[in-house]
């Protein structure tokens, strides 16, 4: 969506009677000053400039890549020094965070509802009015929806824009968030197909990702099955194919609404409070960053390439999401030192 917004803003900015394409260096530099004067952050301005370059690239419009614009690069660097703020990185979600969140955040909602409605889960799967009208049961269903979204987002290294709609009405990511029709289960593995994303804004390819069942409360496959049953009943496989993956319910109402970005972030922050974490840095991006960080520690050949493939990274930015532990940082220096100690053959 950044490329689309950049195109629209740039086209509106262009001087009257001046064709916007190909974008000259003077026009792009003027647009940069214009966006900063309008109060956009340096990061947003940079994204817009990158979006203009990307638009020209995919449409075969002659242009000079941003990295070959030294004057523009110096303008961006100067703007960062003058106006830029220290950017906060999303705090990565960890395996321990997930385990503790289930015990301290999800289970209390279930226990409260189960005390009020014996046979709670069966009533939810059968869409029994007793459960659908009970405030505690509905609160548990909504927490379970957020919990399922948390597991899916974590295991699939998924971008928030692919995971959920941005807003309830007219979401800006309507072309990229996953629908139920983009999901299926095969051999105890949950599969997704994303036709558009941040790195695929024109739908020129399809990104496919899978999640393997792990069993127990940390299993995203089982969580998704339960959430589908709580939302649509036992016939869930044939229902809601054009609706978003994760749904919320209001007590007494037959219809559901989408779980959106802000609501999931609020749940993540509530989980953080429940497990004793500071909520600073907790965002929807925490799932993607945490999963990439944890995966880097696994004994998997070419793990960085595997993470990039799972999370649909198309650049070296995947390396920015890795919180490398001291032991990993010491691996190469120690190998170099060991080689130096060995006598020459």
Image (cartoon, grey):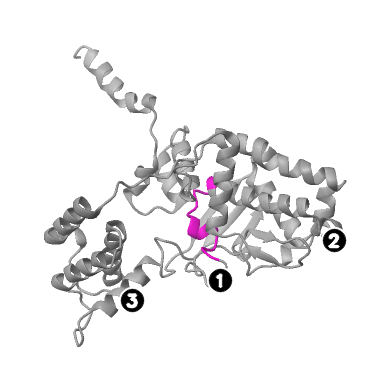
- In front of the other: 309 or 117: 117
- Quarter residue 228 falls in: bottom right
Mark 3: secondary structure: helix
Vertical arrangement, residue 27 with respect to residue 264, above or below: below
| Residue designated by label 2 | 129
Residue 76 visible in rendering: yes
Vertical arrangement, residue 59 with respect to residue 43, above or below: below
Structural distance between the alpha carbons of marks 1 and 2: 28 Å
Is 242 placed left or right of 199 in the picture?
right
Estimate how packed mark 3 is, as few (under 14), some (14 to 19) or many (20 or more) residues with alpha carbons within 10 Å.
few
Image quarter where the N terminus lies is bottom left
Where does the image place residue 165, in percent across and percent down from the top left? 54, 63
Q: Residue at x 39, y 29 (%)?
A: 325
Where does the image place residue 185, in percent across and percent down from the top left? 66, 54
Q: Which mark is residue 169?
A: 1
Q: Nearer the viewer, mark 3 or mark 1?
A: 1
Q: Residue at x 73, y 59 (%)?
A: 231
- In front of the other: 132 or 292: 132
Where does the image place residue 44, in percent across and percent down from the top left? 31, 60
Q: Residue furthest bottom?
A: 17
């Amino acid at each position: 969506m950044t490329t689309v917004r950049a195109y629209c803003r740039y086209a509106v900015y262009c001087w009257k009677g001046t064709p916007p394409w190909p974008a000259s260096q003077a026009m792009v530099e003027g647009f940069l000053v214009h966006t900063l004067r309008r109060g956009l952050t340096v990061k947003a301005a940079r994204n817009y400039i990158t979006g203009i370059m990307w638009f020209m690239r995919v449409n075969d419009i002659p242009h000079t890549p941003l990295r070959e614009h030294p004057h523009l690069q110096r303008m961006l660097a100067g703007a960062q020094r003058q106006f830029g703020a220290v950017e906060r990185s999303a705090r990565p979600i960890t395996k321990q965070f997930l385990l503790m969140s289930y015990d301290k955040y999800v289970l209390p909602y279930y226990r409260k509802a189960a005390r009020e409605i014996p046979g709670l889960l069966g009533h939810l799967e059968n869409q029994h009015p007793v459960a659908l009208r009970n405030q505690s049961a509905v609160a548990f269903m909504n927490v379970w929806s957020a919990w399922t979204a948390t597991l899916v987002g974590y295991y699939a290294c998924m971008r928030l824009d692919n995971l959920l709609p941005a807003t309830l009405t007219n979401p800006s990511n309507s072309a990229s968030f996953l629908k139920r029709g983009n999901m299926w289960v095969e051999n105890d593995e949950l599969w997704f197909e994303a036709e558009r994303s941040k790195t695929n804004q024109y739908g020129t390819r399809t990104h496919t990702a899978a999640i393997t069942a792990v069993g127990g409360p940390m299993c995203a496959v089982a969580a998704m099955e339960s959430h589908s049953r709580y939302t649509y009943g036992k016939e869930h496989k044939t229902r809601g194919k054009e609706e978003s993956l994760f749904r919320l319910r209001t007590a007494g109402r037959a219809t559901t609404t989408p779980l959106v970005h802000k609501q999931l972030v609020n749940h993540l922050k509530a989980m953080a409070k429940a497990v004793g974490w500071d909520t600073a840095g907790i965002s929807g991006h925490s799932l993607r960053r945490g999963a990439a960080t944890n995966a880097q520690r696994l004994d998997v050949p070419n793990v960085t390439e595997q993470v990039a493939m799972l999370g649909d990274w198309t650049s070296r930015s995947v390396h920015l999401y890795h919180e490398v532990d001291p032991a990993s940082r010491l691996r190469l220096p120690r190998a170099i030192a060991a080689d130096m100690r060995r006598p020459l053959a």
